[in-house]
Image (cartoon, grey):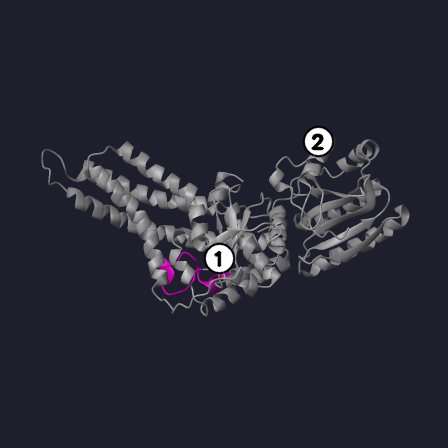
Amino acid sequence: MAATKTEFGRDPGLQFRMILTLFLLGALYVVFAGALFAAGANGVLILVICGGLAFFQLFTSDKLALHAMGAREVTPQEAPELHAMIERLCIQADLPKPKIAVAQTNMPNAFALGRSQKSATVCATTGIMNLLSPAELEGVMAHELAHVKNRDVAIMTIASFFASIAAMILQFGFLFGGGGHGDDDDGPGMLAIILFSLVVYVVSFFLMMALSRYREFSADRGAALVTGRPSALASALRKISSGMDKLPQQDLRVANEMSAFFIASPKKVVAGLFSTHPPMEQRIERLMSYESQLQRGTLAAA
Amino acid sequence: MGLFDALLGGKKKLKAPAPDRLFAMSTAYVTLDTSHAIKTTGSAGIVFQPLATADFEAIATEMEEILSGTGADTGTTIRTTDDEHGYRWMILSDDDIEDLVVGVNAVSDALAVGGYGDRVLAAVFAFEDSKGRPVYFIYNYKRGHWYPFVPAGKLQRDGERELQIKAIIGDELPIEPELERWFPLWGTPI
């Protein structure tokens, strides 16, 4: 089972493309709804069609994402340690056992997929399993299980859907408030409506990224609680962030919305506002404060 | 977990141990033994996460001393071992299942009193059927449920046998209703 290894140059524009993909994905809804609306479809119909699309996305995205990452579900015989580790974490976190997949790539990463706790899949790359010690890997898998427990995949999908809804509501508002009365067919025009909706969507898009960062912190905290070893996850994050810059990231080109569920963003090219993950230093800092709370015996009570 | 927890990113605490149904084993064992020839091997273990905090080690050591002390009366012996997954096992040996149940309960109580009750993963009781095959009963503290675990060779489990066992003892032992939570524990040191 040799991993196909291809040399790719460094790609500073990768993060940007990823964000753009995510952005366009949502913009598609907005433009689509705008077009339907301008074509004279009624509001309810538009909501039903777009809702259906979001629903479809929610139900199929995990399989597509796994396929895109080249990940394959593994049996307990193929990956006994990984299975045993996750089983124990599941008992501790009171979760049903998720499907476990492994992606053959040197890039150290892990992610969780699936709309519900029962249909969840957690995936680790061969890179991360080689890079980290068992305790560190346990911290990372606990972080992914915390995403499952917190239902982050469903929440982020729904959040992106809401962002589109916000833009659509604006489209209606434009019609009833702004212009388009009488026989003035030129009115605000289809283009203006769509453009304006896009602006609203841009704003909600940044809010969505912020939401994703908060949920990242929350998953770190969940992992610290479940393993009782915040420092192990902190150490894992440090290893990943330093290992990340040295390795090619060819596989990430296919990663779009699922990047929100990676343990670490691939690079800090586009910082702050555009980032689905908080800066590594901040995450490590928080984990260290959990560690001192744990040592004082105040973590569980906090 | 409710909607509110989901939106706020989860509960702030680990789930506390469920109401104790550990003692159901004492009565269920009578049926297992007399009607189905599933007999105790004389050992049981309790597995938990050892934390790297100062008072945790003190609590664990104290607990072992107390149990060794009471063990002198009942004949229960106790030993501690760490497994390859970083979990700690306290293994009790006694031919009387009643003493094993009491001993396991004493360990989890001591951890709970010390504030570490949420670190207990499971209790495992080892049995053998009439053909000498191992049968484990695992008690999940978080859920307060039991389930059977029958290993059949390397990393294989005998699902049929486990379901049979559920059928014969399900009335007397609170069995975990969701099959996907029948987590195996490979390489148990008992």
Q: In the structure shown, which secondary structural element does the residue marked by tag 1 occupy?
A: loop
Q: Is residue A82 above or below residue A167?
A: below
Residue named by callout 2: B167
* Direction left: furthest residue: A183
Q: Where, by quadrant of the figure, is residue B17 drawn? A: top right
**Nearest the camera: B103 or A39?**
A39
Q: Residue at x 49, y 53 (%)?
A: A71
Residue named by callout 1: A263
Q: For the residues tagged 1 and 2, is the chain the same?
A: no
**Nearest the camera: A6 or A179?**
A6
Q: List x then y, in percent, for residue A17.
A: 33, 59
Give the letter of the chain under mark 1: A
Q: List x then y, in percent, for residue A212.
A: 42, 52
**Nearest the camera: A273 or A23?**
A23
Q: Amino acid at mark 2?
A: Ala
On the question of residue B34 being in view, the answer is: yes
Q: In the structure shown, which secondary structural element does the residue marked by tag 2 occupy?
A: helix
Q: Is residue A78 left or right of residue B187?
A: left
